[in-house]
Amino acid sequence: MNNIFTLAFFETWLVAAFRLSGPILLVALGETIGQNTGVLNLGIEGAMLGGALTAFAVTFSLGSPTLGILSAILCGLVLGLFLSWVYITANVNQVVAGVVFNAFMMAAASYVYRYIYGNSPEIQRVTGFSPIHIPYLSEIPIIGPALFEQSLLLYLAFVLVAVSWFALFKTTLGLKILGVGENPRSAEASGISVNKTRYFGVLYSSALAGFGGGYLMLTAINSYRDGITAGKGFIALAIVIFGGWNPVRVACAAIIFGAADALQLSLQSAGIPVIPQLLFALPYILTIFAVSGIFGSRSQPTSLLIKYER
């Protein structure tokens, strides 16, 4: 039990916490913008899965993780274009459409992987992004390795947090997004295109979902398997609620969930006798508490899930 109180344990835990928070952070960050336009993009789990498979396939074929992550983002955009049409133009129920899309993507991704790579028991692996060691800063005890020995993708995720917050609350585009999310009819009357703004929100959330899937593939797992996302898209939905639809708060919530996810790995590595199933379920238990309102209620965008007709 003394292993849990060592400096090495806390350093390992924090490094894993920030690394594992990256995919959830990216997906939740995109969903924050999307929901602020009034659209619940439940299909982010499927877009994340598509991004992971695309990142794996491109990196495996070309040997370039950079092209792999760019392809994952492009895959998210393409899937987002379809989802935008379903949610906004076709006016299909957002919850139903999202659930069906996720189920389709799970089956389609499994089929595509087996069609390309067969059913070989040998695990195919790719080389992803290596951690970047920032001189001097990475030598700071405990927080140094956690903050300054991470992959480029995590640093990009943190940059996107700042960009998303600034764009949402300090720019004209942000005012349009918030206006459409709160009162689309008034926004339309003031010359703002509700549909175009909502298309942007869904495209942005889907692109970051693809980015999150690529991040998961190229920094954490480096091999593809069925169900690789393990419900992280749904956890991201809970994080958006927990973070009150604010990019900075959402980032803090993602790190908390990443810490819960990393705890199971750190405790097992330290040889702590705990029930592994309980540790594996910890992030999902935290998700239930996040959406239950036990940590305080948050005011969602007024027009969320409400169809708009001109």
Image (cartoon, rainbow, N blue to C red):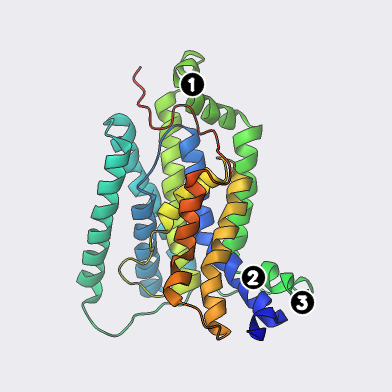
- How many numbered discs, if any? 3
Q: Is residue 102 left or right of residue 115?
A: right
Furthest toward the top, the residue is: 189
Task: Return the residue nearer the eye: 287 or 186.
Answer: 287
Task: Return the residue nearer the eye: 252 or 210.
Answer: 252
The span from disc 2 to disc 3 (Cα, nearest Å) is 14 Å
**Residue 30 position within the rendered picture, expressed as x and y whole percent measured from the top left:** 49, 46
Q: Amino acid at mark 1?
A: Asn
Q: Which residue is mark 3?
A: 139
**Residue 224 position within the rendered picture, expressed as x and y whole percent measured from the top left:** 35, 72
Which residue appears at 43% of the width and 60% of the height? 213
Q: Reading the chain from its start, which is encountered first: label 1 or label 3?
A: 3
The quarter in which the C terminus is drawn is top left
**Residue 207 position within the rendered picture, expressed as x and y whole percent measured from the top left:** 44, 49
Q: Residues within 10 Å of mark 3 (few under 14, many from 20)?
A: some
Residue 64 in sight in this render: no
Q: Reading the chain from its start, which is encountered first: label 1 or label 2?
A: 2
Which residue appears at 45% of the width and 48% of the height? 237
Q: Residues within 10 Å of mark 1 (few under 14, many from 20)?
A: some
Which residue appears at 25% of the width and 75% of the height? 117
Q: Residues within 10 Å of mark 2 (few under 14, many from 20)?
A: many
Q: Which residue is mark 1?
A: 183
Q: Is residue 308 left or right of residue 128?
A: left
For label 1, the SS is loop
For label 3, the SS is helix
